[in-house]
Amino acid sequence: MRASGPESTELIKRVCIIGCGSIGSLYAAHLAKVTEVWAFVRRPEHAEALSRDGLRVTGTHQFHAKLHAAHDPADLPEFDLGIVSSKAAQTAEAVRPVAHLFKKGAILSAQNGLGGEEIIAELAETLVIRGTTFMSGTRHSDTHVEYELDTATWMGPFEPTNTPFTVVQEAAEFICSSGLKAVALQDARPAQWSKLIFNSSVNAVSALTELPHSFHFAVETGFSDLGYLLHALIEEGKQVAAGLGIQLHEDPWEMNKIGAQTDHPPSMLYDIRHRLKTEVDFLGGAIAREAQRAGVPAPLHTALYRLIKGKEASWTYDGKRHAAANKQA
Amino acid sequence: MRASGPESTELIKRVCIIGCGSIGSLYAAHLAKVTEVWAFVRRPEHAEALSRDGLRVTGTHQFHAKLHAAHDPADLPEFDLGIVSSKAAQTAEAVRPVAHLFKKGAILSAQNGLGGEEIIAELAETLVIRGTTFMSGTRHSDTHVEYELDTATWMGPFEPTNTPFTVVQEAAEFICSSGLKAVALQDARPAQWSKLIFNSSVNAVSALTELPHSFHFAVETGFSDLGYLLHALIEEGKQVAAGLGIQLHEDPWEMNKIGAQTDHPPSMLYDIRHRLKTEVDFLGGAIAREAQRAGVPAPLHTALYRLIKGKEASWTYDGKRHAAANKQA
């Protein structure tokens, strides 16, 4: 189902990358090699830097790309394809100002977790593509991204917009033509849920312990070992997927074992350290809600979801004796 | 079973308070009014300050007491009663140097959680009293403690040392004679487990969210509300107690509802903020282990226990890319 070649770029002549973090920057730079790319970003200085300096890619691929960028939606033309790579929690805010520019095209959600597609479909009258990317990179500056794992974006029709599979295939072929990896699937949910379960479990444990994705996540020796908790979270997630009739594409426990060798800091750890609203509503919160819908218990994902929401609440809560911590309880 | 009066102090002529945090300071100051009290503390300057200035109590009770204090066990005489009020995690370290000084007396454990009595009994060849205190106070300095809730210490025989009930009664009457509240019980486990379940649940959620014991802990309206998690933790704890044949003395959920109006920072929140080893092994960890022993599932207490152990591990873990947090996962 993977394809590349010049013919695939003929249908998609202008692309908008919505949100240029590490993943958005990787899409923008690669696609700019084969078509006209615009980056829609929140900060004016970010747009200015991209317009002036382009994007430098280091790591697995090494090149420099020139592209267009804007922070004002009035500066943007119409597009054949949009790729939403903002934080899941910022989807509505990121997509709303440009939602009208994709009427003749499609929008791919390349975000973490579950629920981004629903938000995009509600805002934009266009075809939506369900996407899950396994690429990873580090954003060193507004104009420099390091490409780490050159793994695929898995894509499939978003069911409620009846996106034709040919549209998904075109988009996947187009992405492949830029040197990235993409796979078109008749049903992308097994891939999305594999990553959702992996990501929810690892991000939640990392956010609450403030450990990166370290060896601790896979150790199952002593009673207090975190590997047991990861295993239990992953098993619970699998039960929820099964309850929804979704058979997983990959085993999240195997993904965890590999990740636990990297010391990679998951995005939610970054958010917690910087007191930024996390994506937990689209990760563990999504599993907890889907579990309710399916009538399958998910006590662990639900517990960790509530703890992270409590953590977010703590940043602005100023209790009457909040400061007086030198107490005995 | 509560008693007071001069006759009760006749049997207990010399007391050692092991560990002078807020609870230890409250015992030391009150008991110094009716008998000879020694405080055994870790820091030389703490001992010096107590010897020189005594202890000032403000709040619910207001008085000043003079007492003896030592950081060197060689300076200590023999005792009729010991009260261990160190952190549960420091029990062995605190008791070991003075364990030989109680052969003719008894030692009361007035610590958080479960397991302190076992450690004391292993170190000291003496009678051990199972204790749970509901007093609360704030330690303002080495020589000033504010007394807040003047609630009782519940005491009963520690079963493995076959402590006679009369010994428990004597100790309770003695504590009452000092103006504190104490209750002698034939079986102190229902009281200890009530507080254990309450304390484990509230401390773990506070440690992980960094919220004090705030209103959030009792709210059960929206799906993400923490009250649901507290309720589930407390129910799970009750099932473990029932599995061990222990009927609770008080309902921990009612205790939580009252506490959630105080914004009190639980001791584990203090530990987390100051990166000090927590008491989780004696709280949620104890429930998780007892659940295993009883063959009752306790997935939530076990999960939160593992998260807190992971959090402790994060303070000293220096992964290969720990610092590079600006990543996408």
Image (tube, coloured by chain):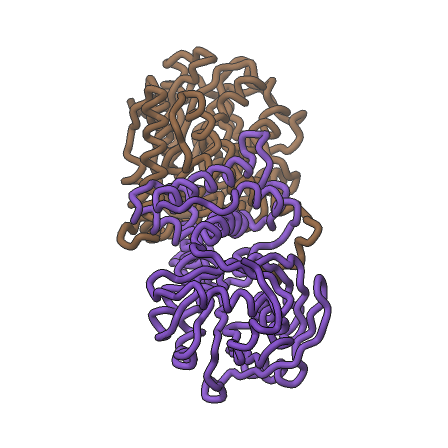
Chain colours: A brown, B purple
Front residue of this view, candidates B42 and B188: B188
Residue at screen point 36% across, 52% down: A214
Instruction: Tell whether B45 sits left or right of A182.
Output: right
Residue B326 position, x and y percent, is 49, 49
Query: In the picture, which quadrant includes the N terminus of chain B?
Result: bottom right
Residue A186 position, x and y percent, is 33, 17
For the question of whether residue A202 can be seen, the reply is yes
Residue B327 drawn above or below residue B92: above
Instruction: Tell whether B41 sits left or right of A325.
Output: left
Farthest front residue in view: B7
Residue at screen point 46% across, 45% down: B248
Count of labels shown? 0
Residue A250 drawn above or below residue A146: above
Front residue of this view, candidates A57 and B1: B1
Residue at screen point 50% across, 16% down: A105
Residue B90 drawn above or below residue B254: below
Residue A165 drawn above or below residue B23: above
Query: In the picture, which quadrant includes the C terminus of chain B?
Result: top left
Residue B310 position, x and y percent, is 41, 54
Farthest bottom residue in view: B75
Residue at screen point 41% across, 55% down: B309
Front residue of this view, candidates B162 and B49: B162
Residue B304 position, x and y percent, is 43, 47
For the question of whether residue A68 can be seen, the reply is no
Instruction: Tell whether B81 sits left or right of A312.
Output: left
